[in-house]
Image (cartoon, grey):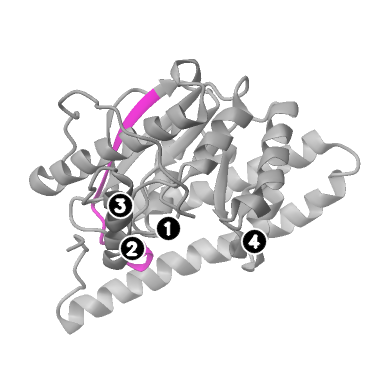
């Protein structure tokens, strides 16, 4: 069973948490309205100066996401516990993270805020999100990458986007969830069945990653990105919904970071496939340890060779 944060018990507690969630979400959404307005005005700068247009959107993202991070940590009292490798200030990176719930995203905003990288985040997200009012529109203007999860349709868009990041020398944290979806019991079982058929590790806490997007990112951003930042994100009290996070029911978020310079990664696509799967085997161990002990411990044992992942898009 997935380790979910239980619902509040008792009518009084539920009412208090509801009111806290309503206030939090209202403040955060209302703050987005003027931000989108500034972004729309900034579009007028695009024919004049693409650099200025990018700068306006970077500032807007940093401001609104900064409000989200500030509210969660300062008002709701959420604490971020980071372990593993230290992160270098100012370096461009491909960020790889496990995906449990939508609540992963504001947790990552808090991490980026602590590193001064909020405005530099470019998310790889599902294509349909670009049409969502306010949030989707803002992400379009920020230059996030919307994908349909069909490589034949996404290939040229992905390559063109990475080429633009390189050519414009954009400060960058490329935010990716290689599992491609939030984890559920049924998705976990499908992933495990696929892994058994393909001779891949039997993972309990995470899904097998889809590797094509990661390989494309490494190939497309060599010479621009400095490192891959591999994050394992966990909630010791149980995986919360986004609503529970806005209610202030999440007291701690734990993050284990592994930083690998791009120059240390293998070159071939097959070897990159295997490298990414090894990271998810490591995540599986980390998540199991978090559930047992309430914290991440450094992974133990040698890394074994893992075959490349066959396409399972």
Image x and y of residue 151, in percent = 60, 50
Image x and y of residue 268, in percent = 51, 25
Q: CA distance from mark 4 to mark 3?
A: 35 Å
Q: Which mark is residue 181?
A: 1
Cβ–Cβ under 8 Å for marks 4 and 3 = no
Query: Which sits earlier in the primary sequence, circle 2 or circle 1?
Result: 1
Q: Say which residue label 4 marks.
A: 130
Along the line of sight, the residue nearer the viewer: 247 or 159: 159
Query: Which sits earlier in the primary sequence, circle 2 or circle 4?
Result: 4
Q: Which mark is residue 187?
A: 2
Q: Which mark is residue 166?
A: none
Query: Which sits earlier in the primary sequence, circle 1 or circle 3?
Result: 1
Residue bounds of the magenta highlight: 242-259
Question: Does residue 23 sit above or below 135 in this rendering?
Answer: below
For the N terminus, give its image quadrant.
Answer: bottom left
Image x and y of residue 136, in percent = 62, 61
The residue depicted at 33 percent of the width and 63 percent of the height is 187
Quarter location, residue 289:
top left
Observer-side mark, 4 or 3, equals 3
Q: Is residue 13 left or right of residue 138?
A: left
Mark 4 lies on a secondary structure that is helix
Q: Which mark is residue 197?
A: 3
């Amino acid at each position: 069973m997935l380790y979910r944060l239980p619902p509040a018990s008792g009518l009084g507690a539920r009412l208090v948490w509801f009111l806290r969630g309503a206030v939090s979400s209202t403040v955060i959404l209302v703050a987005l309205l003027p931000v989108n307005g500034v972004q729309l005005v900034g579009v007028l700068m695009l024919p004049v100066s693409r650099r200025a247009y990018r700068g306006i959107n970077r500032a807007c993202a940093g401001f609104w996401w900064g409000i989200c991070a500030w509210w969660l940590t300062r008002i709701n009292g959420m604490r971020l516990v980071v372990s593993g490798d230290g992160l270098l200030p100012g370096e461009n990176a491909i960020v790889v993270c496990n995906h449990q719930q939508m609540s992963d995203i504001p947790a990552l905003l808090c991490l980026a805020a602590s590193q001064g990288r909020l405005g530099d985040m470019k998310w790889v997200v599902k294509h349909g999100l670009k049409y969502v009012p306010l949030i989707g529109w803002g992400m379009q203007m920020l230059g996030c990458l919307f994908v349909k999860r069909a490589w034949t349709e996404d290939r040229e868009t992905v390559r063109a986007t990475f080429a633009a990041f390189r050519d414009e020398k954009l400060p960058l944290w490329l935010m990716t969830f290689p599992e491609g979806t939030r984890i559920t019991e049924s998705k976990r079982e499908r992933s495990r069945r696929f892994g058994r058929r393909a001779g891949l590790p039997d993972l309990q806490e995470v899904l097998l990653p889809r590797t094509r997007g990661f390989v494309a990112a490494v190939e497309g951003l060599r010479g621009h990105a400095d490192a891959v930042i591999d994050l394992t994100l966990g909630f010791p009290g149980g995986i919360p919904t986004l609503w529970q996070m806005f209610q202030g029911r999440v007291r701690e978020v734990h993050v284990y970071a592994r930083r690998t310079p791009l120059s240390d990664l293998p070159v071939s696509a097959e070897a990159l496939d295997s490298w990414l799967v090894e990271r998810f085997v490591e995540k599986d161990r980390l998540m199991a340890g978090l559930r047992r002990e309430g914290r991440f411990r450094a992974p133990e044992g040698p890394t074994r060779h893992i075959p490349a992942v066959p396409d399972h898009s």
